[in-house]
Image (cartoon, rainbow, N blue to C red):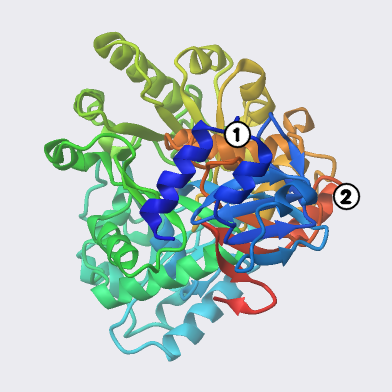
Amino acid sequence: MNRRNRFLWFSAFVCCSVLPEQSRAQSRPAADLIITNAKVWTVDKSLPAAQSVAVLGDRIVSVGSDADVATWRGPQTHVIDGGGKLLLPGFNDAHVHFVSGGMQLDNIQLNDASTPEEFARRIGERAKITAKGEWILGGNWDETKWNPPNIPNKELIDALTPDTPVFVSRYDGHMGLANSLALRLAGITAKTPDPPGGTVVRDAQGNPTGALKDAATEYIDKVIPPLTHDQRLKIVRRALAYAASVGVTSAQHMVASYEDIGIYSELLQRGELTTRIYAAPSITHVDDLAKLGIGHAFGGPYLRVGALKAFADGSLGSGTAYFYEPFLNQGNNRGLLSEEMHPISLMRDRYMKADTAGLQICTHAIGDEGISTILDLYTELIKAHGETDRRLRIEHAQHMAAKDFERFAQLHVIASVQPYHAIDDGRFAESHIGHDRASRTYAFRTFLDQGVRLAFGTDWEVAPLNPMLTVYAAVTRATLDGKNPNGWFPEQKLSVAEAIEAYTIGSAYAEFQEKEKGSITPGKLADMVLLSDDIFTIAPEKIRDVRVLRTFVGGRMVFDAAAGHQ
Ligand SMILES: [Zn+2]
């Protein structure tokens, strides 16, 4: 049966479900795929649990008991025995940097370097196998794991990298360390000013130490040669295979470049796009998207555009998240508004343009005043343009002012949050901002209690893409240093069901796709993941070890642990 006939038939079925069972069974086509004998958790309140799912084309057609769904079986139906394992809707990561993530799979790994010496050693080893003049990038170093936790400087690596430019990033993406060659290529000297929204870290004599914060990293970005088309294609393919292997069936790519979107489009044409992508270019490109005349979620089931990503401030770890009160351990520093907020009217104008064009706005905001300032701008926007279903988002929504929860809910702003950051930043947040502010950090429970919609994501490459780590983080809030086995601010823990809901239908809502995906419901896209263990019943601390057995996107098996990548 061709696609069109299937679709016509399917529409007829949906409209005429009052037909007697017998005549329906005779006239309908058989399913392409049936997964039987599974513990299906649907995230659909009308039928939360089931045993079996039938798929026709790329859509789910039946969910129920093994016997019910078996009526869809025909001679050509591919039947998969779920082995009694847990079957969930595919995970939808609401905030990823998909290409940086793919790059990271190849890049140097510094995150678990537990001393500055180990950090330097790994960079030296990498330089030995790197062609002369080629850059060493990535890294995700984390100095908070060192004793003392000092920000690294170029002296640590210069002697090991005389001919290799190095710019390795801090794990939060808000700081990087350049070696002397990289500084020279970028023309950064003692005379280089701090750009708005950025800092060139300097020693007592005023010379750059190599560490660059936020907007200052752009000095270096400008001299790193851009990826070639083939490099980017290879990276995206690698990211797609990896996403399939961890059960991520949809990814919302924040700050996607036009080149990234071009690669997705190329892979879509070839039928190779195995993760559904919603691409959000930088809001600095608002004029381009407005000119195109497309609104939010424009495109098809595999590739959509129409959201814009903005930045209000920096991060907690880099001391650049924007707070009402200073950090506890950094003099008068209370963070920075981003370059895009200088002046704030620049952001307001871009919001107004985006909203007039029907584009969706996603704004990174981490510090309490950063978040509050964005809520002010969103309020102005709604006042100016009227209420409509625009699904404004705040990405991270990390440190909330007590006064802002209610307003967050009233404005129907979506909290697009990354629970893994809670167990990561939770290691040091209190020393940076104190107990009171820390108590409203990653306040997932308070958000739900206030009626705020949550969307879950990872911020990959900043944090791991594996959804099991995110669910684990939301459910246990056990910090990575092992110091809070019962949870860091345990009152903010979520249940497994709540975490899955935020990661599936919650993220789908955040991209205007909750009618198309996010639950195992007849009529929706057949995006599903079969897990090695039942995360509802195992000990919560075991959730992080759970593996994906099979991943389906549109009914197509894109990962099979038994067979490797397909
Ligand atoms: Zn991000």
- Give the crowd class for mark 1: few <14, some 14-19, many >=20 residues within 10 Å: few
Earlier-in-chain disc, 1 versus 2: 1
Depth order, front residue of 513/408:
513
Residue 457 visible to the viewer: yes
Across and down, in percent, residue 523 comes to: 53, 41
Residue 319 visible to the viewer: no
Residue wearing tag 2:
539
Question: Considering only vertical position in the picture, is 326 above or below 214?
Answer: above
- What amino acid type is highlighted by mark number 2? Ala
Q: Residue at 70% x, 65% y: name it.
A: 80
Residue wearing tag 1:
19
Q: Between marks 1 and 2, how big is the CA–CA gap? A: 45 Å
Q: Is mark 1 within 8 Å of ligand 1?
A: no
**Quadrant that contains the C terminus:** bottom right
Question: Considering only vertical position in the picture, is 286 above or below 376?
Answer: below
Q: Quadrant of residue 364?
A: top left
- What amino acid type is highlighted by mark number 1? Leu
Depth order, front residue of 170/361:
361
Q: Residue at 72% x, 30% y: name it.
A: 492
**Quadrant that contains the N terminus:** bottom left
Across and down, in percent, residue 562 comes to: 70, 77
